[in-house]
Amino acid sequence: MTENKPGMNQDGSRQGWKSLPAGDIMEAGSADKFNTGDWRSDRPVFNAANCIQCLKCWVVCPDASVLVKDGKIVGFDYDHCKGCGICDFECPTKPEKRAITMEPERK
Amino acid sequence: MPSFAAKTGNEAMAEAMRQINPDVVAAYPITPATEIVMIFSQFVADGLVNTEFVPVESEHSAMSACVGASSTGARVMTGTSSQGLALMYEILPIAAALRLPIIMCVVNRALSGPINIHCDHSDTMGGRDFGWIQMFSENAQEAYDNTLQAVKIAEKINLPAMATTDGFIIIHCMEKIEMLDTQDIQSFLGERKAQNSLLDLEKPVSFGGLDLQDYYFEHRKQMADAMDRAGDVILEVGKEFGKKFGREYGYFEEYQMADAEHVIVALGSTCGTTKAVVDDLRSKGEKVGLLKLRVFRPFPAKEIVTALSKAKSIAVLDRSDGLSTQGGQLYTEVCAALFENDKKIPVIDYIYGLGGRDISIDEIKSIYADLKKGNKNKINYLGVRE
Ligand code: SF4
Ligand code: SF4
């Protein structure tokens, strides 16, 4: 990685008060550079065969973690997905043919 | 050109706000500070300022709106008192932590309860540990001057600042004050140059991320460091103000202190009364003096100790009681400063004037008499009925 993560030194250690930008103010969107989804207890699993590509899950995800390529859902960004299950709740597919299922992280 | 005018303390602060012409004012009325924003809102209605005035539904919202507005880089002001300040308490440390130089005109009024609308310092003393600069005023002129300087100080160090006045005593009494030329004030203050702005699309930033075990401590240390450096900024701005406008300000005023043996340390309007007592006693040959503290946050401990070092006895006047059983807030801080510097001067505390109870010339004389005799009580309640 060439660019420093906010709040971190080049060697990966955390910045001290003297070098840290003042006032808990940081560049916007910096969560992109961190794995913020590591405390998830359930993960959404995508079953492409059942998906009707309505994009509802993409609209409702509060963490922008539904991955879209060429206008189609392709899966989830597990570095940032919190496992809230909103995508699964809103997905209109039938119970017996779910496009999203929530599965425990540790079975 | 400066001009003289008859103004109450509230009017003086409202006029200062008009001449500062802040970008945003968000405020909610509360006795006895209502007039400040009421007069100011008239200035807005009359088109005398360009300020976006936000008449919010509570002081909590007022300070929240101030935080939002200040995060964009705007120059932001508000005013309040007592319970209104207390309702802001939740947001005050956030303003400081986000390093937002919000300026607040505070009219000191007793905190409820019992409910009371008159002067004491319990409201700002309750907010003394929130990372706000606090400057007290003896009279309307100082309220005016402190409001103007607070803008420059706050914006130089990126900490919020309160300029305070004594409820009713200063703010409802009319005095002759010297008002400065608006253009001179504008050139003295300049523009606020914020490092970050929430509205800057070229350099988008996030304010106030969750700050846990790994970063909170470092950000708090930054605030402590800024408060430490604020002292020099206050002196620098006070000097510049003196050079430009003829009234220099420091951490405190030393009144007849050069050879003073018995000294009173006090805040706010009581210092005016104490000066009259000092003059009277001096004319009778008594070596008495007054240390009128202007800056309470940051607390200029070292300088206070130097100023008090030749005294034989000291009385601290506290217009608030922390109910800690250890005396008022000013007393404990003065004692700590003297102890740290190995000064073994007897110091006694007088908690007085709570809820607007008057303090008389005779009572202040009795304090100097106690100091001469050597009063045995460390903590005294002056003027309370037994
Ligand atoms: S579980 Fe929640 S966070 Fe994860 S993809 Fe679905 S909606 Fe987004
Ligand atoms: S909501 Fe369900 S069906 Fe619609 S795009 Fe998302 S996964 Fe596919």
Image: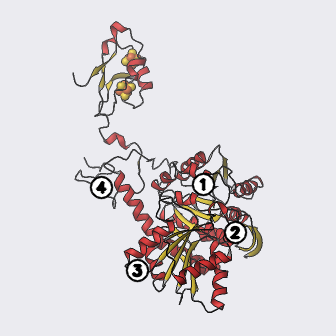
Residue B304 vertical placement versus B13 (above, below): below
Front position among marks 2 and 3: 3
Are labels 4 and 1 assigned to the same chain? no
Residue at image x 65%, y 45%?
Answer: B56
Q: Say if B352 sits above or below B362 in the image.
A: above
Q: Amino acid at mark 4?
A: Gln
The subunit letter for the residue under badge 3 reads B
Q: Secondary structure at mark 1?
A: loop
Which residue, given by chain and number where applicable, does mark 4 sit on?
Answer: A15
Give the residue at the far bottom of this rendering: B285
Q: Nearer the viewer, mark 1 or mark 3?
A: 3
Q: Closer to us: mark 4 or mark 1?
A: 1
- Cα gap from disc 1 to disc 2, whole angstroms: 35 Å
Q: At label 3, which amino acid type do we have?
A: Lys
Closer-to-camera residue (B164/A21): B164
Same chain assignment for discs 2 and 4: no
Q: Earlier in the sequence, mark 2 or mark 3?
A: 2
Query: Crowding at label 3, few (<14), some or many (≥20) Cα neighbours within 10 Å?
Result: few
Where residue B361 appears, as percent x and y from the top left, is 68, 77
Marking on residue B182? 2
Q: Residue at x 29, y 38 (%)?
A: A35
Chain under disc 4: A
The local secondary structure at tag 2 comes to helix
- Mark 4 to mark 3: distance in Å? 42 Å
**Numbered tag placed on residue B111 in the rendering:** 1
Residue at mark 2 to residue at mark 3: CA–CA distance: 48 Å
Q: For the residues labelled 4 and 3, say whether their Cβ atoms are less than 8 Å apart.
A: no
Asked if the residues shown at circle 2 and circle 3 are in contact, with their CB atoms under 8 angstroms apart, the answer is no
Q: Which mark is residue B344?
A: 3
Question: Residue B196 at what x, y percent from top left?
Answer: 47, 54
The residue that appears at 57% across and 51% down in the rendered structure is: B86
Seen at 69% across and 51% down, the residue is B29
